[in-house]
Image (cartoon, helix red, strand yellow):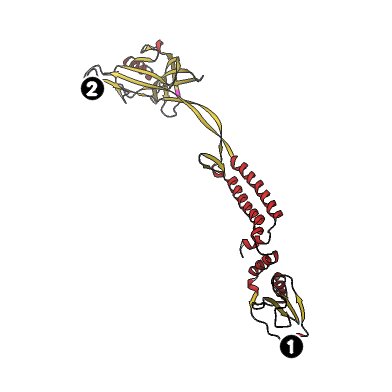
């Protein structure tokens, strides 16, 4: 049974107009939802600034050795040797991509005696670079260290502390950045010098970095509830509602104008609908007149095929259809129930019991 047969029963200007008006409202609601998809707020970085301090250290070889020739410059070496590298240069360099001013707030050195077991500081001494006997500032970001003098001082300290201590020298260079973004950033670089033995030493240093961000809250459409068509973000639910509205409008147009072009009456359309709907209850055949019983049959005419099927259901009978005479009927307990399709000649029967 098709949807078309169902709609045929409702041909009406009033119904069609009402459905069309309802579909327009539905489409308008869909347009609103489509053009205003669900959104969420996310925080995005619109500017990221990185400030950093690097430490470069080097020493010039003062004499030939098995490892280096005289005058060779060892840069950022993993290890230096006092007899050929008695002078160490440490250079601090700041970096920022943009306009900035960097001021060095203080340059300190700290000698620490640290327990090799519990990593506890047993003894420490902090001095400004210029107040030591073994270091000097070449400029505000460069320090020159006499490693022989420093080694002698370390040995003096080492004689007064337990053997289970490790002595290191930590340098502290603190920079203050001022930029065009009105950032005020303070960074401290703390490379450490450690004597591995009485003849060698090493520098442990890492780049110091910090980041500043400028963020803003951005409203974005929900990906799961929106789609992009021709560069425009549209709400999926709105598109679905518009589609439903268009289907309903087509139904309304069919109901409004279908009756104009239909040559069948309402009863004819209703009969076609019921015939398709109740086909499984109908058996095709021919009636046989029986004068012995004809006079005692009670005859009942039913107005619709659906009504006759209801009788069949209640009496557990089959509906018989005589195609030649266009009659539907049921025999049940002395009663003849019959239905005549529209435009059927009621007298067009050779059998009186109809």
- Residue at 52%, 32% (x, y): give it: 44
Left or right? Give the position of 206 relative to 335. Answer: left
Tell which circle, 2 or 1, labels the residue nearer the N-terminal end: 2
Residue 112 placement (x, y as % from top left):
42, 20
Q: Are marks 2 and 1 in contact (CB under 8 Å)?
A: no
Residue 268 placement (x, y as % from top left):
68, 67
**Image-quadrant location for residue 260:** bottom right
* Closer to us: 267 or 203: 267
Judge whether 178 appears above or below 235 on screen.
Answer: above
Left or right? Give the position of 123 relative to 11. Answer: left
Q: Secondary structure at mark 2?
A: loop
Crowd band around label 1 with a 10 angstrom C-alpha radius: few (<14), some (14–19), many (20+): few
Which residue is under mark 2?
A: 68
Q: Secondary structure at mark 1?
A: helix
**Which residues lie in the magenta part?**
117-121
Asked if the stretch drawn in magenta spans residue 287, the answer is: no
Q: Quadrant of the N terminus?
A: bottom right
Res 75 label? none
**Image-quadrant location for residue 61:** top left
Residue 53 placement (x, y as % from top left):
41, 22
Depth check, mark 2 against mark 1: the one in front is 1
**Image-quadrant location for residue 277:** bottom right
* Closer to us: 32 or 292: 292
Judge whether 77 appears above or below 146 on screen.
Answer: below
Which residue is under mark 1?
A: 291
- Judge whether residue 37 can be spotted in this image: no
Judge whether 22 appears above or below 220 on screen.
Answer: below
């Amino acid at each position: 049974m098709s949807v078309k047969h169902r709609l045929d029963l409702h041909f009406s200007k009033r119904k069609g107009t009402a459905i069309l008006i309802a579909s327009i409202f539905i489409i308008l609601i869909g347009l609103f939802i489509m053009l205003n998809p669900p959104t969420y707020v996310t925080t995005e970085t619109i500017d990221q600034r990185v400030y950093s301090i690097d430490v470069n250290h080097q020493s010039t070889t003062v004499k030939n050795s098995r490892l280096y020739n005289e005058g060779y410059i060892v840069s950022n070496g993993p290890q230096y040797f006092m007899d050929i590298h008695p002078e160490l240069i440490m250079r601090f360099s700041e970096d920022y991509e943009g306009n900035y001013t960097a001021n060095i707030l203080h340059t300190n050195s700290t000698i620490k005696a640290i327990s090799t077991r519990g990593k506890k500081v047993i003894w420490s001494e902090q001095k400004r670079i210029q107040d030591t006997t073994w270091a000097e500032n070449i400029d505000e970001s460069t320090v020159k260290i006499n490693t022989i003098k420093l080694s002698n001082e370390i040995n003096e300290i080492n004689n007064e502390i337990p053997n289970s201590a490790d002595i290191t020298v930590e340098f502290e260079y603190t920079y203050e950045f001022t930029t065009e973004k009105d950032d005020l950033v303070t960074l401290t670089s703390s490379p450490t010098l450690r004597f591995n033995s009485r003849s060698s030493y090493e520098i442990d240093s890492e780049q110091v970095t910090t980041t500043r961000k400028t963020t803003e809250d951005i409203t974005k459409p929900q990906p799961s509830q929106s789609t992009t068509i021709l560069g425009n973000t549209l709400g999926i639910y709105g598109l679905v509602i518009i589609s439903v509205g268009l289907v309903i409008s087509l139904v309304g147009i069919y109901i409004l104008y279908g009756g104009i072009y239909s040559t069948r009456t309402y009863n004819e359309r209703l009969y076609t609908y019921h015939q398709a709907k109740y086909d499984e209850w109908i058996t095709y055949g021919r009636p046989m007149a029986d004068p012995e019983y004809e006079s005692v049959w009670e005859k009942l005419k039913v107005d619709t095929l659906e009504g006759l099927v209801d009788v069949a259901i209640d009496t557990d009978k089959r509906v018989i259809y005589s195609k030649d005479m266009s009659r539907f009927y049921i025999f049940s307990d002395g009663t003849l129930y019959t239905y005549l399709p529209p435009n059927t000649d009621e007298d067009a029967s050779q059998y009186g019991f109809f």
